[in-house]
Amino acid sequence: MDFYSTKTPSYKVDLKEAVIRSLPPDNGLYMPEQIPALSDEFWANWREYSFAELGFQIVNPLLGNDIPEADLRAIVEEAINFDAPLVKLTDTLSILELFQGPTLAFKDFGARFMARLMGYLTRGDDTMLTVLVATSGDTGGAVASAFHKVPGTRVVILYPKGKVSALQEKQLTTLGDNIHALEIDGTFDDCQRMVKAAFLNRELSEKLNLTSANSINISRLIPQSFYYFHAARQLPEGMLPTFVIPSGNFGNLTAGLLAQEMGLPIKHFVAATNVNDVVPNYLKTGDYQPRPSTATISNAMDVGAPSNFARMNEIYSGNWEHMRERIEGYAYDDATTRDAIKRTAESHDYQVCPHTAIGVLAAEEWATSHPEDHNVVLATAHPAKFLPTMEEELGAGATHIPERLACLSELPKEATLMQPDEQALQDWITNTL
């Protein structure tokens, strides 16, 4: 399978180039040349496969010509070794728990698959692989966990100072070894801009063998499509899900669009954002206007210029009408989000993080005009990762802290403070690594 740039469709590369270089030289994003429809044999058996086998059957038509089936199956089985259960709250509302992996966030699906795929594609290479990633919260921890102590790799994580939760920060600043954290005195959009600029410096990118672990990397998105299929098969046969997706950089939603393009029957998508509502505004008006992000309690969604909008646009061939027929967009402020955290706990005896609470709000709003739909909200992270907010709304001690998070609290933070300057990052990379 070749991959083309969303900005220059005639520019095509093979799988290794797309995954390892991450970003085309024209600053577009890579997309697969074809999105294959899954076979009749798949649909005859999909409900019976293990989760890992389901993932293999989905990814094999995309990458099977590039990687032998046995090797690809092993990559998926090692990456997808935890579940994503569907928890029913009402007859028309379920929560898909995507936080059962090692870092308690949905980013584990993409990061673990990507780390193993990169390891496979670079086996035998002499050059150290440098993974450069911007995070608004959970991506950094998932990538750090997936690549920690992996031979032949080093990881540089940029995160916005004071704009990730304390436990999220601990997950990406306490591992050491081959993991380096850069605390950027700015926003996530600054972090993302700095990372993209480093990749567009082709001399630097090739010299240090730079690769990205953000959702700009196509290998992050592909495995995220797996859990859409897994959610759908946990519903009664014949019931079409409406997926409600807390959205920031829109990689999660784009993975759902890939699943739909491969043949998964989906009734509708609902994009739920905080006040950083660039895409909901576009869906309403047809006018796409990125802007600086605003800090909120749902920090992982504080994105004012979502990268994956380019892929969404590509899937719909730039047709606004077509996109808004398939996707609805809603946005909510912090006060409304806090209320949803409290109401969900009181009404359903179920705790949701601030991001998932925004999904619940969107599901409720969608249900007012579509009461027959069964809404599946993607729960993006364990609520304990946002403990101050949870305790403010539910009280001290109300939220259970898993041991894998609790053990981080006393570990020392190791991070380098940096101004949001593209050249400062490139100089640091050149002089430090």
Image (cartoon, helix red, strand yellow):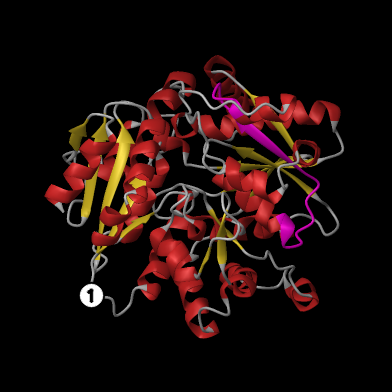
Answer with the quarter of the image where residue 93 lies.
top right
Residue that appears at 23% across and 63% down = 149
The amino acid beneath tag 1 is Asp
Q: Quadrant of the C terminus?
A: bottom left
Q: Is residue 417 above or below residue 340?
A: below
Residue that appears at 59% across and 40% down = 309
Residue 262 belongs to the span the image colors magenta:
yes
Q: Which residue is mark 1?
A: 126
Image coords of residue 316 (percent x, y): 73, 47
Say few, some or many: other residues with alpha carbon within 10 Å of mark 1 (under 14 / 14 to 19 / 20 or more). Answer: few
Q: Which residues are magenta?
A: 260-278
Residue 275 belongs to the span the image colors magenta:
yes
Answer with the quarter of the image where residue 168 lies.
top left
Q: Is residue 155 above or below residue 41?
A: above
Q: Which one is nearer the viewer's eye here, 345 or 291?
A: 291
Residue that appears at 63% across and 64% down = 33
- In the rendered structure, the answer to whether residue 236 lies left or right of residue 396 reads right
> Which type of secondary structure does the marked residue at label 1 adopt?
loop
Answer with the quarter of the image where residue 265 lies.
bottom right
Image coords of residue 272 (percent x, y): 63, 32
Q: Quadrant of the N terminus?
A: bottom right
- The residue sitting at the left extreme is 431
